[in-house]
Image: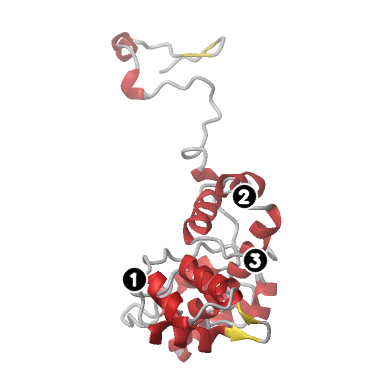
Amino acid sequence: MGRKPKPPEQRMAFFTARASGTSLRKSAVLARISRSTACLWLKQSGGVRPRATKPRPALRLSLDDRESISRGLATSRSLTAIAAELGRPVSTISREVLRNSGQSGYRAAPAERLAVARTRRPRLGKLALDDRLREYVESKLNVCWSPQQISKRLLKEFPDDQRMRVSHETIYTSLFVQAQPGLRAELTAKLRTRRLRRHPQRRVACGGKKSRIPDLVPLKDRPAEADDRKTPVIGNLNVFVK
């Protein structure tokens, strides 16, 4: 029968937690998914946070509608009766059953996956559309340049050509998300980190870079007498200022 697909809100909650630097196990707990599902999502996305999905139009069948169709067919109800229960035209139910029925008949979860796959449009990135830019990036990756170096080098070598511009995040996305056409997957072996997917920036979870000085007081909060002090105190040592 297949597993029931996870709602988009759970997927976005997981990747939002990962983007903030939360560990894999804790991100899975926050999104209320298993660790195996979290690993599968990371593998499929290359560690890159997916784009937010738009709400489904009311005219399209939902997963609950498809489950009602599946239950109705299992109890030998007619398509007319199922359509009346859902408040849909009979032609809509008929097309749905005809398009998404498999060898074992109509099942809600596989039908939902097939319907989502049909509505998903392939999004071509900049590197997939521009052969010249893609060849330049690939040539630099082959000699172990980092995506950051490539992005900055383009500005120097092509200062007047706006088409020869690409961010390092676009390069990473094209490398790690192989569902998106662009750079060859084997070029990931040329990265210095040898990573197979994008890692979250953990400094975001900490609210910025932590200071090594304990109990640090900002300059704006220092007392007024500090302006007239000629002998600043650092720890237990006096440092004289000439």
Given the image, on which type of amino acid does mark 3 rest? Arg
User: Residue 232 is drawn in which quadrant?
Assistant: top left
Q: The N terminus appears in which quarter of the rendering?
A: bottom right
Residue on which disc 3 sits: 3
Q: Residue at x 50, y 39 (%)?
A: 209
Question: What residue is shown at x 47% (from left), y 82% (from top)?
Answer: 79
Q: Is residue 177 above or below residue 49?
A: below
User: Label 1 belongs to which residue?
Assistant: 57
- Kindly tell me whether residue 121 is visible in this rendering: no
| 18 vs 82, nearest the viewer | 82
Q: Residue at x 51, y 66 (%)?
A: 148
Residue 233 badge: none
Left or right: 4, with 82 as reference point: right
Q: Are marks 1 and 2 in contact (CB under 8 Å)?
A: no
Task: Name the residue type under label 2.
Answer: Ala
Give amino acid for label 1.
Pro
Q: Which of the two residues, 71 or 19, is positioned nearer the viewer here?
A: 71
Q: Position of residue 37 (x, y in %)?
A: 66, 59
Q: Secondary structure at mark 2?
A: helix
The image shows residue 149 at horizontal and vertical percentages of 52, 68
| Mark 1–mark 3 CB contact (< 8 Å) | no
**Dot 3 surroundings within 10 Å: few (below 14), some, or many (20 or more)?**
few
Which mark, by number, is residue 28? 2
Could you tell me residue 134's position as x and y percent?
Answer: 50, 85
Q: Earlier in the sequence, mark 1 or mark 2?
A: 2
Report whether residue 236 is seen: yes
Alpha carbons under labels 1 and 2: distance apart: 29 Å
Q: Identify the element where label 3 is drawn.
A: loop
Locate residue 96, reporting x and y percent. Answer: 48, 83
State the CA–CA distance, disc 3 to disc 2. Answer: 18 Å
